[in-house]
Image (cartoon, coloured by chain):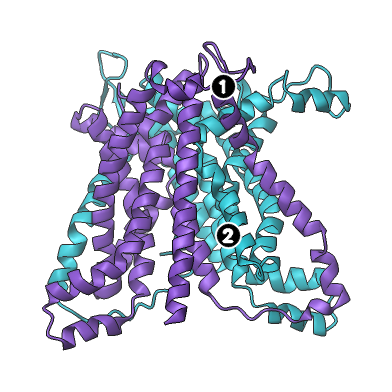
Amino acid sequence: MAFSAFAPSTVSEQAPRRKSRVALLLLLPGILYLLLFFLVPLLSLILTSLQAPTVSGDIGQYRTAFEWQNYSTAIGQYGGQILRSFVYAVLATVFALLFSYPLAYFIGVKARPYPLLQNLALILVIAPFFISFLLRTLAWKQLLSDESAIVTGLKALALLAPDAHVTGTPVAVVFGLTYNFIPFMTLPLYASLERLDLRYLEAGNDLYATPFSTFLRVTIPLSMPGIVSGVLLTFIPAAGDYVNASREFLGGTGTTMIGNVIESNFLVSLNYPAAAAMSVMLMVAILILVTIYVRRSGTEDLL
Amino acid sequence: MSTQEAAALATAGNAVETPAGSGRGRKRDSNFGGWILPVYTAVALLFLLIPIAYTFVFSFNRSLKSNISWRGFTFDNWTGVCKAQGVCEAVGNSLLVGVIATFLATVLGTMIALALVRYRFRFRSAISLLLFLPMATPEVVLGAGLAAEFLTAGVQKGLVTIILAHTMFCISFVVVTVKARVASLDPALEEAGRDLYGSPGQVFWRITFPLLVPGIVSAALLSFSLSFDDFIITNFNSGAETTFPKFVYIAAARGIPAEANVVASAVFVLALVVVIVSQVSAAARRRRLAAT
């Protein structure tokens, strides 16, 4: 969705100098809003993560403290879920990239002479966004259930063991994460492939490069901004998602991710410090990964 | 979700002139894009549509309490959507939240976008970071953070807290969408207004604002669709109130009524119509501009 935000800025920053009072009036309400409802919540998350139970020990009652061991307790208790979230999100991102690249290449490069076809294909790519996120995930749950045509078909072809299940397994969760975030990958890839200058490919061809090495050395590097924003836009929501992995959707008891832990601690067992500690760790991990990734791949101006 | 942005992108993409390749006749060039790629694209697009088709088909199912196995065709779910308990109240809440949050986010975001493109000021990079971060933060962190803040401040969770949360995550998307539009405005048009002795207010409301309307409309549509489909942040900040996604989540445990499929299918058709209309009108506008 926000892929254009991740793409290199095309806006020239040569804003003319004008009365800064007007700028202040324009900025102030929105910036104050974000400070109050984005930054302060992050700070209160940090404070909450350090709270200790009250002396009475009532459920959901905490006092301000500096209980740093909340973090080590959370890591000890939920290390498996932390690792799993990372692995699932990486797998979903890789699969989404492999799925989306040829698709985006066809729409952005091969279909260029046919604008109508391009537009139609793009509408179909974003079509999943128009249907409720939860309902499309539930649709896959039904489509992959033990009695479904897909699963019975796979079993008839002996591609799946007769007593195997698909829903409730890591495979189903990674599949769901991949499916749900494919448009986030395809759109930025399309945006950068659409601008690819085909004369560079011809040059590669003229210099006796095989189509494969032209692709590897020309097309991929030129579409790097799209790959970077697509990877970020897929990885971030996938790592924090708790719908796909939830037991009512595609997951099972053995597939819970960080998001599920935060949700159940915050909303069910009212263990706010644990939920907050997990949220802070997820946020910090994602910020570190994003910074490293963006530095490495050289797309530094973000907005 | 990002329907409008994608639509805007599609049209913007078409406007960009790219030299077409002339190496098409070469043997080497044609085998990769021969038939494999178009066939793959068709299959991939069909794959993306599978759950949509499933949801749509099962909105016509003569279902009992849960809507899992096919029991025959009926229009009853469509004609009596509100008969299922809680569906229409949830949709009503989602519409209310969506409209108010969209309005607030669009106003605040448009103002920021204007300031960012048109003015020079201090702390520019800090402000850019503050606008970028909400988009790079996992929704579960945004939701838990707000919930922690409301808890500490002793704010009762309800529709108001849902609206506050949705406005927050929509602002950045509005800024990104409107900023592109402000940056692409031709400064000569405003100069002409000033040359004709228009006051700053007149120049803004008679020239700048009308030219920004398409960008503002896309931003508003994007905000509304983000708000309408949001579940994760809503779940943390809704208290006892339900929105449509939250209704689906709760119902998932005991079986989703077919009426939920009706709502989702209707929203799908509506969104599709909006996107197609905006594409067609953008194409018509381009043709008109090209003709003059």
Q: Quadrant of the C terminus of chain A?
A: bottom left
* Picture residue at 27% right of the left edge, 82% below the top: B189
Q: Position of residue B170 (x, y in %)?
A: 34, 49
Determine the colour of chain B: purple
Q: Is residue A111 shown above or below B53?
A: below
Amino acid type, residue under disc 2 in the picture:
Asn
Q: Chain of mark 1?
A: A
Determine the colour of chain A: cyan
10 Å neighbourhood of mark 2: few (<14), some, or many (≥20)? Answer: many
Q: Is residue A39 shown above or below B154?
A: below
| Mark 1 on the same chain as mark 2 | yes
Secondary structure category for the residue under label 2:
helix
Q: Is residue A66 visible?
A: no
Q: Position of residue B32 (x, y in %)?
A: 82, 65
Residue underneath mark 2: A119
Q: Is residue B140 shown above or below B118?
A: above
Disc sitting over residue A247 in the figure: 1
Q: Is residue A77 visible?
A: yes
Secondary structure category for the residue under label 1:
loop
Front-most of A198 and B135?
A: A198
Q: On the picture, is B62 further left or further right than A13?
A: right
